[in-house]
Image: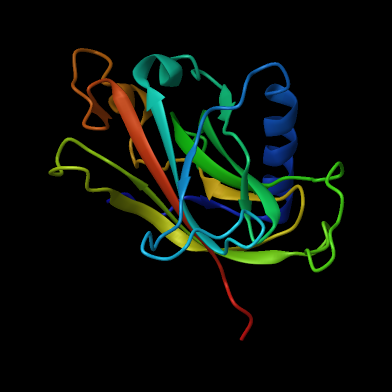
Amino acid sequence: MASKDQTASSSETTTAVADDTSSQQDAPPHPLQVTSPDSSLPSPSPRQRRCVAAYMDLTREECGRLFPSGRLRSQPLRLAGRPFYLTARCNMDQRDTFRCFGLFLAMEVDDDEEEEEGSPSPAASVTVEYDFAARTRQQSGDEFVSMYKGHYTFAAGKSCGYRNLLGTPWASFMGDGGGDSVFFIDGVLHLRAELCVKEDA
């Protein structure tokens, strides 16, 4: 597996979020399927959810349209009452040597949301443990392979992610030049982000 290529510095992540927001104003958010980890328990309301699994499926054509510097933002999801979204993008790797597929998680500014009694303040930060995963044709069934995991303390307008999520240049990821990409299954890239609010010690 490729080495970690995390982008989590305050200056880098602030810029990424601003770019994501402005570049997606005219594009509809991409659908997400959001589930709770334990399906045997009653499903909590979006304001109460502290752990979720978010699934984002992108076709090869959607990924192709990201080249050379496009971004695709997901529908929002609620985690512990706060709004988050995922952003898939084509970007340069951390060393600025080649283009690759990146995935980011951002906490959205929620100015229009009315505060309810007992709900978190929009300005409050929250630490989220995350695990970004993808399916490949090298795995059997619906198994996902964990690509990167860690934790990050979010505030509104901040993001955390990986410029080179899949550990390969863009051409190899897309299967250009006659190659066959292992990341597209029947023409679809399957991504999963497992997110869980980290409890205070």
Does the rendering let one see residue 98?
no
Identify the image quadrant of residue 40. Answer: bottom left
Identify the image quadrant of residue 135. Answer: top left
Residue at 35% x, 19% y is 60
Relative horizontal placement of residue 40, taking residue 185 as reference (left or right)? right
Compared with residue 124, is residue 169 higher up or lower down, i.e. above or below?
Answer: above
Total labels: the figure holds 0
Residue 182: image location, x then y, percent: 21, 31
Residue closest to the eye, 118 or 25: 118
Residue at 87% x, 50% y is 114
Compared with residue 175, is residue 20 higher up or lower down, i.e. above or below?
Answer: below
Residue 18: image location, x then y, percent: 75, 36
Relative horizontal placement of residue 183, taking residue 198 as reference (left or right)? left
Compared with residue 149, is residue 28 higher up or lower down, i.e. above or below?
Answer: above
Identify the image quadrant of residue 77. Answer: top right
Q: For the C terminus, which image quadrant?
A: bottom right
Residue 94: image location, x then y, percent: 51, 43
Residue at 48% x, 63% y is 150
Residue at 32% x, 22% y is 174
Residue that extends furthest to the bottom in the rendered view of this protein:
201
Residue that extends furthest to the front in the rendered view of this protein:
42
Give the color scheme: rainbow, by chain, secondary structure or one colour: rainbow
Residue closest to the eye, 21 or 93: 21
Residue 186: image location, x then y, percent: 22, 22
Does the rendering let one see residue 38?
yes
